[in-house]
Amino acid sequence: MGHNSAEYITSVSEAMKIATVEKDTRMGDPKFFDIPFEVFLSDEYSLQMANKIKRGEKTFVPRLNTGADPKETTHICVADRFGNCVTMTHSLGSSSGVVTDGLGFMYNNCMMVFDPRPGRSGSLEPGKARFTALSPTIVFKNSKPLLLVGSPGGTTITMGNLQAILNVLDFDMNAQEAVSAPRFTTTSNTIELTNRILRSTEAELQKNGYATKRHPYSYMMPTLQTIRLSNGKLDGGADPSGDGMAVGF
């Protein structure tokens, strides 16, 4: 598949939609909810979902609102020539505006992330941990780190991290190219596109029955940060839409 072709966007979007539905219905705080880890991590499940996408089946993703993703998250990737590396996402989720004197940090306000409806995987309960999209990731090859990636961006984090990984592994992009390439995100029945996705590609998606939303800017959340470790060399990339930067010493 060509990068950001209609076929590529369709396949990756359907994977995003499947993951979103599974997250909403079959994942939650393991102290309160039985997550089928063995199913999610099995080859059989992956093959079943892949075949579903190949057959052209569209996954339906119910959504109650289109709330904006908060902007209280930061991410950092660090690596050295010895292979030591850290990828870390820090987030308030949604800041409460409350700071305790002398402590210097703001408390989060993430009860809003829970599902207000009782009896569901993400329902609000005392002592329960809420869902988070934070996904700082290290990709390994032959037991050695190959790629670090992470980002702020609320529910779009996972979708951006996925595309950065695919850009490096499947399209041989360097770190900066991987985070700068045009992106899309699909956490509902609508495929959201940055303005650098070709309009002819968008028209083909619409022809194939997909609703699309074109954002009027060149970049969209999340704000990706990445480091690639290749052949003993390191190169980093910071999303041009944010205030991050890649620095080597």
Image (cartoon, rainbow, N blue to C red):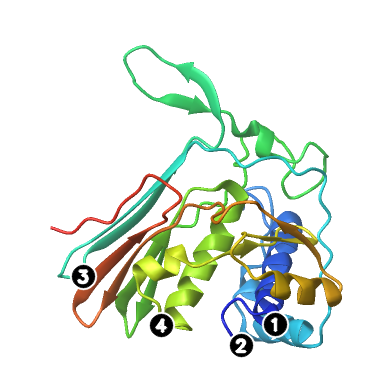
Mark 1 neighbour density, 10 Å: few (under 14) some (14–19) many (20 or more):
some
Pointer 4 and pointer 3: residues touching (CB < 8 Å)? no
Q: CA distance from mark 3 to mark 2?
A: 32 Å
Closer to viewer: mark 4 or mark 3: 4
Residue 45 x/y as whole percent: 69, 81
In the displayed structure, does residue 80 sit left or right of residue 14? left
Relative depth, front residue between 145 and 191 = 191
Residue 221 x/y as whole percent: 55, 51
Pointer 3 and pointer 2: residues touching (CB < 8 Å)? no
Mark 3 neighbour density, 10 Å: few (under 14) some (14–19) many (20 or more):
few
The residue under the point 41% across, 15% down is: 100
Nearest to N terminus: mark 4 or mark 3 = 3
* Tag of residue 1: 2
In the displayed structure, does residue 233 sit left or right of residue 52? left
Nearest to N terminus: mark 4 or mark 1 = 1
Label 1 element class: helix
The residue under the point 31% across, 81% down is: 143
Residue under pointer 4: 172
Q: Amino acid at mark 3?
A: Gly
Q: Amino acid at mark 1?
A: Glu
Q: Is residue 2 above or below residue 178?
A: below
Label 3 element class: loop
Residue under pointer 1: 7
* Tag of residue 83: 3
Residue 213 x/y as whole percent: 74, 57
Relative depth, front residue between 12 and 239 = 239
Q: CA distance from mark 2 to mark 4?
A: 14 Å
